Image (cartoon, rainbow, N blue to C red):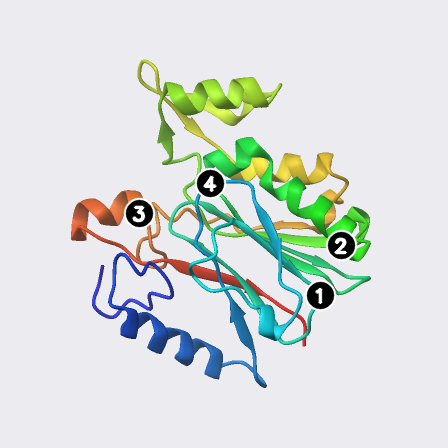
Amino acid sequence: MPHAALNLAGFDEDAAENIHENRRRFLRLLDGEWTLAVCWQVHGADVRVVRGVEDALSDEDRCDGLITRAPRVLLSVKSADCVPVILGDMRTGACASVHAGWRGTVAGIVPRALERMRVEFGTDPTDVRTAIGPAALACCYEVGHEVIDAFRERFADADELLTPTREGHARIDLHLANRRQLIEAGVSAERIHVAPLCTMCRTDLFFSYRREKSLYGRTGRLLSVIGRG
């Protein structure tokens, strides 16, 4: 990755001291003291609860979604082409950070996070505001038959999410897939904010696993965060 890149995760790609220093620099930009909750993302659908500062997860805890209602806890999601989704309950103050790659999207991790928020904190999806962050978009993200088959099995409207390219391949729209899952779960379309930015197109702004691995042999991770003061 470029030497000056602000890598905030990806310990398998960078020295730990560099990442910890970058995180300290990031946290210093925020008002007050915050505890960063992170996890080791495994492209699954497990969502865990962070109940307080003392319960903030380490990079060794394996899951792909975090939820909390605790103040001064900053939930995070790492990404470098996968879709980062953050959710905030405007009524209860609960929030979530979700890592939605193609596997997590097929597994429905975003609606699972919403359901976990309902069970733990009484969240009503109509009170939730959501942001879907930069990711590899349909302009660039080409997949093979394994992903195509999984989406056709999971989504009745899968052909609207896929653009055929060469034989046995298609470009896939993960932004649209996650947006539709949010709407189906009860989130108002007007409260879903989508960043129309492709990590594969804009490597000047974002890390991209698919693009930068071939250029540098490694890449960093973006960190999308949400919390309540």
Residue type indicated by callout 4: Gly
Quick one: label 4, few (<14), some, or many (20+) residues within 10 Å? Answer: many
Q: Quadrant of residue 184?
A: top right
Q: Earlier in the sequence, mark 2 or mark 4?
A: 4
Q: Are marks 1 and 3 in contact (CB under 8 Å)?
A: no
Q: Earlier in the sequence, mark 2 or mark 3?
A: 2
Residues at marks 4 and 1, CA–CA distance in whole angstroms: 25 Å
* Residue at numbered disc 3: 209
Residue 138 percent coordinates (x, y): 44, 34
For the C terminus, the quadrant is bottom right
Residues at marks 2 and 4, CA–CA distance in whole angstroms: 25 Å
Q: Are marks 4 and 3 in contact (CB under 8 Å)?
A: no
Residues at marks 2 and 3, CA–CA distance in whole angstroms: 34 Å
Residues at marks 1 and 3, CA–CA distance in whole angstroms: 32 Å
* Residue at numbered disc 1: 69
The structure residue drawn at horizontal position 33% and vertical position 70%, both measured from the top left corner, is: 19
Q: Are marks 2 and 4 in contact (CB under 8 Å)?
A: no
Residue type indicated by callout 1: Arg
* Residue at numbered disc 2: 120
Residue 64 percent coordinates (x, y): 52, 48
Q: Are marks 2 and 3 in contact (CB under 8 Å)?
A: no
From the viewer's side, name the closer residue of 13 and 48: 48
Residues at marks 4 and 3, CA–CA distance in whole angstroms: 12 Å
Q: Which mark is residue 101?
A: 4
Q: Earlier in the sequence, mark 4 or mark 1?
A: 1
From the viewer's side, name the closer residue of 110 and 52: 52
Residue type indicated by callout 2: Glu
